[in-house]
Image (cartoon, rainbow, N blue to C red):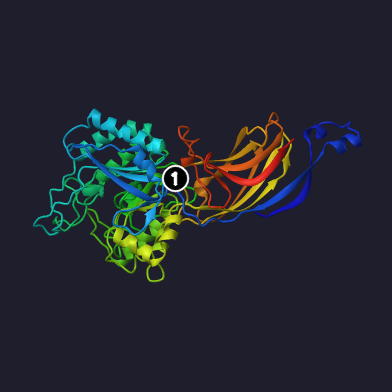
Amino acid sequence: MNIKFTSVYLLSAVMLATNFMSCKDKADNLVKVEKVNVSYTESTEDFPNPERGFYRYSETYASNYQLLNADELKSYRTLQAIPTANYQVYSTLVFRYYILDNLTNAVIGASFLSNIQKDMVAARTAGVKLVPRFVYTATANAGSCPEGFICAPYGDASKAIILSHIAQLKPILHENADVIACVQLGFIGTWGENYYSDYFGDPSNNASQGKLLDNNWQDRIAVLKAMLDAVPADRMVQVRTPQFKQRYVYGINSQVSSAALTDGEGFSGSDAARIGFHNDCFLASSNDFGTYEDLGNSSTGRSADGSVVNALREYVKADSKYVVVGGETCSDAYSPANDCEPGGHAQEEFASMHYSYINAHYNTEVNNDWQTGGCMDNIKKNLGYRFVLESAVLPDNVVRGTSLNITINLKNVGYASPYNKRTAKLVLRNTKTGEVQSLTLATDVRKWYSGTQKVEESISIPSDFPAGDYEMLLNLPDEYASIATRPEYSIRLANNNVWEATTGYNKLNHTIKVN
């Protein structure tokens, strides 16, 4: 850590308020303020941080509910090996399949809802967050049909049943928003991936139409609208394909070239700003097994030609800057494209599409190649955000009733910025008493995008602020009061000699005197 000083002078409020002060009195009230330049050292350590990274997989069935275990969830925050994998990961996210296998024609019972609540309590106890997806079937039934590995009937539910279930789930989703990172749309089709469906159109080779019709899109949009309403307004809903978002935002005749979110629209709380993406076939083929494809409508045909793929990819590159993106790999057949650089472009794809998380368990054939190829360490550290303090300009003292001016220079070396709101706080901790004063900063941490960031703040110091010497710290806690004081839910900066594990604060390695 290097510290340099430059001097300025600040007249106290007392001196400015009087016109009759003697020269000697004026001199006594002249406060010398040093602007201190503090530099920081970047850490290369891998460590857990909330709402990002490699997620752990879990599933449960309505017909045979298996509760989440808080102790097991807590262990995911430590470095753990993954079955069939050659790598180890820290995890703060748990993907949770809720498979409503016996509820395709029934209401959700009280015991099922109670068990979901118990899962949420377990996650909160463990210091992790969930990514839920509600589906009716996660099984591909093979048979003598064109697709072969999966044949109709697929086993999902009608729109009426889905909408009724979403209404039942709304209270529990709102009650537990603090430990929900985001929600995946689910419901429609096998695995909830909105493709192989008995009720919402079947664009697969198993159906003669081979595309979606207008009424299919209208029904899908109705389900997404219901989910956006059921999920708290400060949480995002992920859809499986970018075209689904386009047709929700711009209508069922929208083009694959439809406009992405802008800086002014991102994080605005609008429906468009709350729809993210989960790509469950990351770098699996030239169009990620249909992720980047036009499924048509009643008046247009289906297309996956190069121009369509490129247009949808460009849309996601731009839109994903402002929304949550995650998923999993699903096939190693696209190797070496899905390998490490220079032979492949896995890291480039993660960065350009702003990925915050990926499945630790599937497909380990793909993920294992990142370990052997030498880029896994970077991927583990850079999924989502990774904030590095570079330097700060901090005053050595401040007069009560005036403003404290600070400049913090940092870089986000991660692939994305945080997708859920966080209020940054400057913490002043008395060096003698340990008493903590927390001052809210104006900056929006969600807009600390990849690259360099400068945070300049002028913070009012109350006139009754206790005088004394204070350590300066930066706190990036969860927005929800229920977990805001939990260090597991605060963001750790990637610097040496900065993190306080017991408090969740990041030390700025500087002391200020409050006069």
400 left or right of 99 in image: right
Q: Which of 261 and 78 is in front in this view?
A: 78
Above/below status of 250 relative to 467: below
Q: Which of 392 and 64 is in front in this view?
A: 64
Above/below status of 192 relative to 367: above
Above/below status of 91 relative to 125: below
Q: Tag count in the figure?
A: 1
For the C terminus, the quadrant is top right
413 left or right of 365 in image: right
Residue furthest to the left in view is: 144
Residue furthest to the right in view is: 23
Q: Nearer the viewer, residue 211 or 495?
A: 495
Q: As shown in the figure, which amino acid type bears the numbered disc 1?
A: Pro
Q: Say if residue 250 shows up in the picture.
A: no
Q: What secondary structure is found at the residue carrying circle 1?
A: loop
Q: Nearer the viewer, residue 223 or 185?
A: 185
Residue 354 in picture, x, y percent from top left: 42, 55
Residue 189 in picture, x, y percent from top left: 21, 47
For the N terminus, the quadrant is bottom right
Q: Which residue is drawn at 14% across and 51% down?
A: 141
Residue 268 in picture, x, y percent from top left: 46, 43
Q: Say if residue 508 shows up in the picture.
A: yes
Residue furthest to the bottom in view is: 343
Q: Picture quarter containing residue 429?
A: top right
Q: Residue at x 38, y 55 (%)?
A: 88
Residue at which label 1 appears? 50
Mark 1 Cα shell of 10 Å, populated few (<14), some (14-19), many (≥20): many
